[in-house]
Amino acid sequence: MRYNLSEMTDYINDHHPGEPGIAIVLGSGLGDFADGLDDASTIAYRDIPGYPKPTVEGHAGQLVFGRLDEIPLVCAKGRFHFYEGHDFNTVTLPIQLFAHLGVRALIITNAAGSTSRKLPPGTLMAIHGHMDGTFRHGIGDPQPVTGAPFHSPQLLALAHQAAGITKVELAEGVYCWTLGPGYETPEEIKYFSSLGADAVGMSTVPELQAAADLDIPALGISCLTNFAAGISDQPLTHDEVIETADRVKVQFADLLREMVRLAGAELNL
């Protein structure tokens, strides 16, 4: 799918002039963060010329522009997934649009399943590496990819600094991207875990790859909302994802706000 990014950018600039310095992608159940911005204005995805709409529960389908301590932000409330029938260009469209809007740093959040009992539901995990578990390019074992350009060491350091300031516990690990929409089997989780995955989810990796291609420093942070299949005896449901995200959203918001303050100072925003 091809998109007219210039037309989209012109529409957004007409309705919200000024460059947002930092962008945040808000995952399932995490959209409330955008409600606390100062001077907030919202643009619905459906109003942006040619922009698709998300179909997953917990993804509102809005860009929210505003300020936090005078630092200009844009938050994407809703993302696109391969399992919705989208191609790579559509899945990464928000990141491409952020680049056109002049974004200088990107924080990507998601809800993910934990592959380890050491990382229980409710844990926040900074992503320092990723794996592509979709097997789109072959049947070889996926390998962890860590560090720059996909995972900004500077933003990772700021995340831990923010965690210390806010007293929010922040783990660190490798996120494995799977196609979905069904949850993985216990054997799949055992396999990915043996290769180094600490969490599994159905998003984020394409966005990190697009940010690297566009030279936008990026960091992913997962809210581990459930144990992946086979880690516990409990059945997996999307309701659990939303409920756990809701339970930790205050701590997550505190962490994000402090990260924005630190990154804004770093970028002189």
Image (cartoon, grey):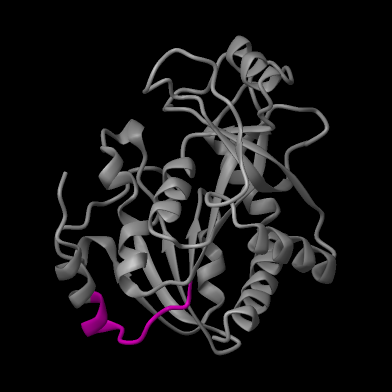
Q: Nearer the viewer, residue 246 or 123?
A: 123
Q: Is residue 102 above or below residue 241?
A: below
Say whether residue 67 is left or right of residue 171: left
Q: Residue at x 42, y 20 (%)?
A: 135
Say whether residue 254 is left or right of residue 92: right
Say whether residue 46 is left or right of residue 105: left
Say whether residue 8 is left or right of residue 151: left
Q: What is the quadrant of the N terminus in the image?
A: top left
Q: What is the quadrant of the C terminus in the image?
A: bottom right
Name the spot of residue 55 as percent of width and height, x first. 32, 44
Residue 98 location, quadrant: bottom left
**In magenta stretch: residue 216:** no
Residue 111 location, quadrant: top right
Which residue range is magenta in the image? 12-22
**In magenta stretch: residue 20:** yes
Q: Is residue 263 above or below residue 106?
A: below
Residue 153 location, quadrant: bottom right
